[in-house]
Image: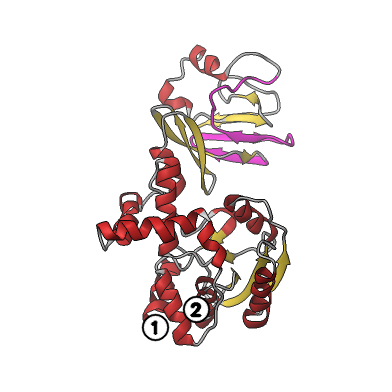
Amino acid sequence: MDELRDRVERFVREHELIPAGGEVTCLVSGGADSTCLWHLLGSLGYRVSALHVNHELRGEDSEEDARFCADVLGAEVVEADGRGLTEAELREQRYRVTAPHKLRASGHTASDQVETILYRLVSRGAATGIAPKGDHGVVHPLLPLWRAETEAYCRTAGLEYRVDASNAETKRGLIRNEILPLLRRIHPAADENLLRALDPRDTLPPALAELLAAPVGSKRVDLGGGLQAVREHERLWLEHGPVELAGEIRWGEWTIRSELEGLRVRGWRPGDRLAGRRRKIQDVFVDAKVPRSEREAWPLVVRGDEVVAVPGIVEHPEVQAVRD
């Protein structure tokens, strides 16, 4: 057990998932993975609470899961009718109803990672996986562990856990119970080798890796920290996300100031037009002889989707912009 704790602690520290001694809400189902998560994080000194979302999908079994999480794990139980929703919609519902909890952790493991890689390869053509810090502010501290290890942890610690028989009916269940066993017949290290598919992209956020692997087209992904990656067919660039223009801000070589409310600064996007006019910003750049290589980094001052100023080119009386 100590070796598993050490592995998880190193992973949490490496990816800065939870502040030392900080509070974290574990999203628990009652299964081995989330039960292990709840107990292991508590044993590492984090201030752990538990939260269970009852989607009411399996009648009395769902009620039993909720009672187990409340009685054994001390979980708060939230009722959210998920009948008729897809797996993805259930996940979105679960994250939405738990959003008031600032830092949440889920029990996704390396086994879930392998299943995700396979599913995305088939459905998207991209070998991407679960990020340590996922969407909706949910962190995944157990990604260094395999599912068998969380079950062994629970047995060693004397922890009971629930088994969801309905998992076999899901897409993940199909991958877990039918596809992966066949792949292991081809090679016994199939799981580990599939996990290594992420290695060439281990320095890239999953969203950026997926953007690079996607079919040619136009797409924008948020990398966090106000940075966005933009792909326009064969061209790819990084740009700052929209920044509120409250007083004065810096944007690259530019200092931009305005006291008007509701203004933001962002990079150029194909299709942008000047406010109240039909003229495209691309044509503005062409007329001003701005090299194509500089256009993506050029700041635009916008209100909503309308461009009110292009610093150094199209002025606004209440926007001041100076370039170093």
Residue 118 lies, in percent from the top left, at 40, 51
Q: Residue at x 61, y 14 (%)?
A: 279
**Residue extent of the magenta highlight:** 246-275
Q: Quadrant of residue 261?
A: top right
Nearer-the-camera pick, 66 or 99: 66
Residue 198 lies, in percent from the top left, at 35, 52
Q: Residue at x 49, y 14 (%)?
A: 286
Amino acid under disc 2: Leu
Q: Residue at x 46, y 68 (%)?
A: 142
Q: Report the residue marked by disc 1.
A: 2
Residue 64 lies, in percent from the top left, at 66, 75
Q: Against 67, is 116 above or below?
A: above
Left or right: 242 in relation to 216 = right
Q: Report the residue marked by disc 2.
A: 40
Amino acid under disc 1: Asp
Residue 287 lies, in percent from the top left, at 51, 12
**Which circle's residue, 1 or 2, is located before the other in the chain?**
1
